[in-house]
Amino acid sequence: MQVHADRDKCEGHGLCADVAPEVFELDDDAVVVVLHEQVPSALERKAEAGARVCPVAALRVST
């Protein structure tokens, strides 16, 4: 599984990082950073949950 972040769309709400800090963080400019190029299977549900809570739909999950 991969998570794709549209960094231009990100508004820095940080909900993804709150839900799944093992997968997402915000950089110094409050823009999302995906911590794994390939999300480990143990973190897939967290990655999906983090993507779902993004209020501007800046995150997309693909298999």
Image (cartoon, rainbow, N blue to C red):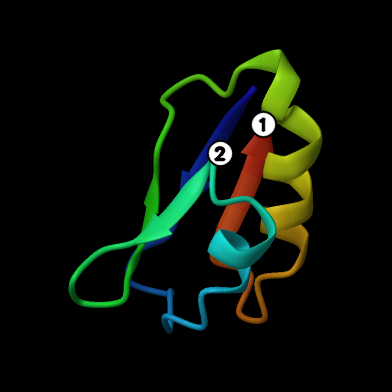
Q: Quadrant of residue 6?
A: bottom left
Residue at 54% from the left image edge and 51% from the top image edge: 21
Q: Is residue 21 left or right of residue 44?
A: left
| x then y, percent, for residue 47 | 68, 42
Vertical placement of residue 1 versus 16, above or below: above
* Circles 1, 2 touching at the beta carbon (< 8 Å): yes
Give the residue type at disc 2. Val
Q: Quadrant of residue 63?
A: top right
Circle 1 crowding by C-alpha within 10 Å: few under 14, some 14–19, many from 20: few
Vertical placement of residue 51 versus 35, above or below: below
Q: Quadrant of residue 30?
A: bottom left
Say which element carries label 1: strand
Q: Nearer the viewer, residue 4 or 34?
A: 34
Is residue 32 among the parts visible in the rendering? yes
Say which element carries label 2: strand
Give the residue type at disc 1. Ser
Q: Nearer the viewer, mark 1 or mark 2?
A: 2
Vertical placement of residue 18 versus 4, above or below: below
| x then y, percent, for residue 9 | 42, 75
- The label on residue 62 is 1
Q: Is residue 23 left or right of residue 35?
A: right
Q: Is residue 45 left or right of residue 10?
A: right
Residue furthest to the left in view is: 28
Circle 2 crowding by C-alpha within 10 Å: few under 14, some 14–19, many from 20: many
Q: Nearer the viewer, residue 23 or 1?
A: 23
Residue at 61% from the left image edge and 66% from the top image edge: 18
Disc 2 target residue: 3
